[in-house]
Image (cartoon, rainbow, N blue to C red):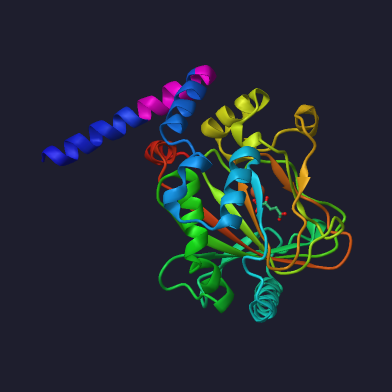
Amino acid sequence: MALPIARSLRSASDRVTRYILSRNERLFIRVYDRKAGLARPTRPETTDACGLDKAARRALEDLHREGFAWWRGLFGDPAFLEAARAEVRDACRLVERRFEGRPDHERTMNDPETGWRLGRPVAHQGRTRITVPNKPGIEKPACVRAVLGNSALTEFVSCYYGVEAWPNYVLMERLQTAPEGDFWHFDKIYDQVKAMVLLTDVGLGNGPVRYKPATHRRPPAIDPLFHHTFRKGLSWAYPPEPVVREIKPEPVYGCGRAGDCLLMDTLGIHSGTRLIEGERLLLVVAFNVRTPKNEFLWRLGVC
Ligand SMILES: O=C(O)CCC(=O)C(=O)O
Ligand SMILES: [Fe+2]
């Protein structure tokens, strides 16, 4: 009997906390930053114990400083790349078949055969996206198993936060020529790192992601949007262009060779750019982490 009472008291207190923080931006920011301070991403000089090699240590330093980093050639095996490109193209063909003849308002569907979440191809952005949850009972192509099974990558992200990290899902993505990129955004107010594995060479014309350096430390102009996202959800995670333009310095572009792995702290502001030529194929591993901030937001039921 005692346990359900304790639980319902706790959930009542969580609801009150959420209500109070919803009403007061400054208080929300203070609490949010204090939770973040409890497990700041580990400083690179304290990460010897993580056993990272030289390339990974350099990427870790860059990720701390800029919120964005390159780990060159991590998945550079040509046989892996060729097979992975074929698997991503196959998955894109499955998406086309599944959406054939479906009404326009259906933006996503769960594929009963594979367990994947399929996104309707977004024509004006040239984007096809398949989400493969990292759960039992979900079909996982070899390329997905390879990125999920790369323990150096998971260790890297755990080391960045100083707490346990685990891959939550993998995106298989294709970008084709299109009139538009997507809008500036942060992914969510939770701590998360995304590892983007390039399966094709990406130059400026091939739709690289762009990232405003150091915005993972949240410039003050972004505070109201974090608060609104807390209150009302992810439609507030899109800072307007003039606000982003005022934030220095200029963006970096996620160009690289097939096999390079880009690392991105998704609290920072970024956007996909328009693909002008060729085709960009990508695997993206999204990592969850058990930071005090995330535990707190999970408890409050924030999306
Ligand atoms: O595809 C891209 O270049 C960026 C996509 C993005 O914003 C993300 O995966 O969070
Ligand atoms: Fe994003």
Measuring 87% from the left and 58% from the top, which residue is drawn there?
205
Measuring 69% from the left and 73% from the top, which residue is drawn there?
92
Q: Is residue 191 above or below residue 51?
A: above
Measuring 43% from the left and 40% from the top, which residue is drawn there?
294
Q: Is residue 238 above or below residue 55?
A: above
Residue 88 appears in which quarter of the rendering?
bottom right
Region in magenta: 15-26
The one nearer the camera, 101 or 220, is: 220
The one nearer the camera, 216 or 120, is: 216
Measuring 65% from the left and 76% from the top, which residue is drawn there?
77
Where the N terminus falls, by quadrant?
top left
Tell me, yes or no, whether the highlighted magenta stretch contains residue 20. Answer: yes
Residue 70 appears in which quarter of the rendering?
bottom right
Tell me, yes or no, whether the highlighted magenta stretch contains residue 211. Answer: no
Residue 145 x %, y %: 51, 73
Residue 225 x %, y %: 62, 29
Q: Is residue 92 above or below residue 19?
A: below
Q: Is residue 136 above or below residue 39?
A: below
Q: Give the left or right position of residue 169, taking residue 81 as reference.
A: left
Residue 35 x %, y %: 43, 30
The one nearer the camera, 171 or 151, is: 151
Q: Give the left or right position of residue 121, taking residue 235 as reference.
A: right
State whether the magenta stretch is mostly helix, strand or loop: helix
Q: Give the left or right position of residue 66, taking residue 157 as reference.
A: right
Residue 190 x %, y %: 51, 41
Give the total number of marks visible in the rendering: 0
